[in-house]
C-alpha cells in the first residue's frame, strides 16, 4: 500500500461523511423497517378478513385466494413477532415483498370475478389503497416502489389485456387512468417520505456532530477552569518568594516563564469559552473532562476560578 | 501580636488561595484579610464583612451553591461601602459581569500577577479611606 493509498483510505470516512447519500438509498432503522412491515402485514390480514366478509355477500366469488392470503399474513405476523427482538431491514423488506406479492395475487385472481358478479363494483379499490399504504410503510424505497408498481401495473395490465370486453365496457370510463393516478400519487408520496427521512437523518447527524464539538469545547473550558486557580497560586507563591531577603531569582524567573507559557494556553482556550458561552461549575470537580479521572498535578479539591 | 480589623474580604473556594492571599496581603501590603469559601460563610460574619474596605470575589464557588455574583448582590443589598473586585477565570465571558461592571466593580482575570494585585488593592484602600 503506497502512502497515497493510505492517505485516501484515511480520508474516505470523511468523504462519506460529507456527501449525503441520495434519498432512494436512505435506510430506515431496523426497528422502523420492522414496524412498517408489521403494519403492512396487519393491513393485509385484516383486509383479507374484510374481503371474506364481502365475498360472503357475493355468490360466485371464490374465497380460497383470500383465505390463503390471510394465512400468509398470519404466518408473516408470527415471523415478525418472533423475530421482533432482532429486527433487520433486509428481513423486513423480504417479508414486505412477500406480503405485497400475496395481496397482488389475490387481487388479480378476484378482480374479474368481482367485476362480473358485483353490479356496483368500484374498480381496483384495494390496489389503489395498496399504492398509498406502500408509500406510507415500505421499509425501503426500492421495496416500496416495486410494491406500488405491482399494485398499479398489475391492475392496469389486467384491465387492458385480461378483462373480457363486456366487463371492460361496464367498468368506469376513468379506468385505467384513475388507477395510474393512484400509482403516481403513491410513488410521489414514497419519494416525499424518503426525502423527509433523509433530511431527518441529516439533521440528526449534524446535531450529533454539534453535540460532540460542544463536548470538546466544554472539556477545553473545564481544563481552563482547573488551570486558573493553580496558576494564581503559583503567581502568589512566586510573589512571596521574591519578597524574601535572598530570593532564588533564576529559579523564580524559570517558574515565571513557565507560568507565562501556561497563560498563553489559557488565552487560546478562552476563545473556545466565548464560543460556547459561560457555564456554571456543574460537573464534579473530580471529573473535569466529563470523565472520571483527576488530571495529574491538580488537587482533588482543585477549585476552579 | 494584635490583629487589626481585617480590611479585605476574600471569597474563593480554593483552600490554597485562601491560605496564600492573607500572607501575600500582610507581607506585601501590611493589611489583614479574612477569607471565606462560600457566600454562606460570608453571611455568617456579616458585621465584619460589611466593615471591610475591599472585597475580592471569585465567581464559581462550586456546583449548586451561590456564586460570587450572589455575594456581590448580597454586599450591595447590605450597604457595603468598600470597593469590590472580581478575581475570576471567567472575566471575559461571564454574562452577568458586564452588569456588575456598570456598578463600579472591577474585574480581573486569574492568574493576576501579585504586583498588580497589590497595586489594585492598595489603590482601592486609598480610595475608600
Image: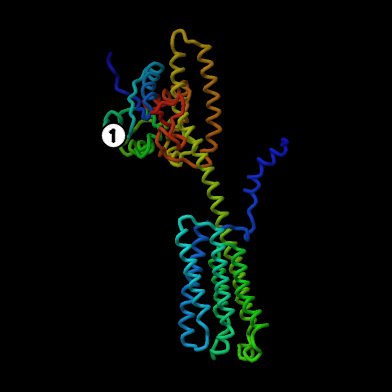
Q: In the figure, residue B32 lies in which quadrant?
A: top left
Q: Quadrant of the C terminus of chain B?
A: top left
Q: Is residue A196 left or right of residue A162?
A: left
Q: Is residue A180 left or right of residue A240?
A: right
The reply to whether residue B90 is in sight is: no
- Percent x, y of residue A226: 45, 30
Q: Secondary structure at mark 1?
A: helix
Label 1: few (<14), some or many (≥20) within 10 Å?
A: some
Q: Quadrant of the N terminus of chain B?
A: top left
Give the residue pinned by disc 1.
B43
Tell me if residue A126 comes above or below residue A76 in the rendering.
below
Q: Nearer the viewer, residue A192 or B116?
A: A192
Taking the spot 53% from the left edge, 27% from the top edge, the residue there is A263
- Percent x, y of residue A132: 56, 72
- State which chain disc 1 sits on: B
Tell me if residue A299 comes above or below residue B99 in the rendering.
above
Q: In the figure, residue B77 lies in which quadrant?
A: top left
Q: Nearer the viewer, residue A182 or A95?
A: A95
Taking the spot 49% from the left edge, 32% from the top edge, the residue there is A224
Q: Is residue B72 left or right of residue A226?
A: left
Tell me if residue A196 comes above or below residue A235 in the rendering.
below
The reply to whether residue B82 is in sight is: yes
- Percent x, y of residue B50: 30, 31
Amino acid at each position: 500500500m503506497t502512502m497515497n493509498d493510505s492517505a485516501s483510505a484515511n480520508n474516505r470516512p470523511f468523504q462519506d461523511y460529507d456527501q449525503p447519500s441520495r434519498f432512494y438509498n436512505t435506510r430506515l432503522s431496523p426497528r422502523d423497517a420492522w414496524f412498517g412491515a408489521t403494519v403492512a402485514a396487519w393491513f393485509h390480514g385484516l383486509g383479507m378478513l374484510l374481503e371474506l366478509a364481502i365475498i360472503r355477500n357475493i355468490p360466485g366469488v371464490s374465497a380460497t385466494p383470500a383465505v390463503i392470503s390471510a394465512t400468509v399474513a398470519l404466518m408473516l405476523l408470527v415471523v415478525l413477532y418472533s423475530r421482533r427482538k432482532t429486527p433487520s431491514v433486509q428481513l423486513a423488506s423480504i417479508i414486505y415483498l412477500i406480503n405485497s406479492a400475496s395481496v397482488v395475487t389475490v387481487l388479480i385472481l378476484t378482480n374479474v370475478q368481482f367485476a362480473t358478479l358485483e353490479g356496483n363494483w368500484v374498480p381496483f379499490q384495494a390496489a389503489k389503497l395498496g399504492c398509498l399504504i406502500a408509500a406510507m410503510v415500505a421499509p425501503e424505497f426500492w421495496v416500496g416502489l416495486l410494491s406500488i408498481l405491482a399494485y398499479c401495473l398489475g391492475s392496469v395490465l389486467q384491465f387492458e389485456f385480461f378483462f373480457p370486453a363486456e366487463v371492460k365496457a361496464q367498468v368506469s370510463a376513468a379506468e385505467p387512468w384513475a388507477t395510474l393516478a393512484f400509482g403516481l400519487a403513491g410513488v410521489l408520496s414514497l419519494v416525499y417520505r424518503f426525502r423527509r427521512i433523509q433530511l431527518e437523518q441529516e439533521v440528526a447527524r449534524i446535531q450529533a456532530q454539534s453535540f460532540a464539538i460542544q463536548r470538546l469545547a466544554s472539556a477545553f473550558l473545564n481544563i481552563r477552569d482547573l488551570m486558573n486557580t493553580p496558576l494564581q497560586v503559583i503567581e502568589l507563591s512566586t510573589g512571596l518568594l521574591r519578597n524574601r531577603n535572598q530570593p532564588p531569582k533564576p529559579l523564580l524567573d524559570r517558574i515565571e516563564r513557565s507560568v507565562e507559557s501556561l497563560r498563553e494556553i489559557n488565552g487560546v482556550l478562552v476563545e473556545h469559552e466565548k464560543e460556547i458561552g459561560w457555564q456554571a461549575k456543574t460537573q464534579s470537580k473530580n471529573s473535569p473532562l466529563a470523565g472520571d479521572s483527576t488530571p495529574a498535578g491538580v488537587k482533588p479539591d482543585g477549585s476552579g476560578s | 501580636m494584635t490583629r487589626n480589623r481585617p480590611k479585605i474580604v476574600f471569597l474563593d473556594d480554593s483552600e490554597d488561595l485562601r491560605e496564600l492571599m492573607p500572607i501575600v496581603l500582610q507581607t506585601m501590603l501590611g493589611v489583614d484579610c479574612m477569607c471565606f469559601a462560600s457566600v454562606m460563610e460570608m453571611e455568617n460574619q456579616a458585621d465584619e464583612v460589611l466593615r471591610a474596605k475591599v472585597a475580592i470575589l471569585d465567581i464559581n464557588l462550586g456546583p449548586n451553591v451561590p456564586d460570587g455574583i450572589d455575594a456581590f448582590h448580597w454586599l450591595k443589598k447590605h450597604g457595603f461601602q468598600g470597593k469590590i473586585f472580581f478575581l475570576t477565570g471567567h472575566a471575559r465571558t461571564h454574562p452577568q459581569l458586564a452588569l456588575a461592571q456598570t456598578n463600579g466593580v472591577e474585574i480581573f482575570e486569574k492568574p493576576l500577577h501579585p504586583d498588580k494585585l497589590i497595586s489594585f488593592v492598595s489603590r482601592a484602600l486609598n480610595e475608600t479611606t
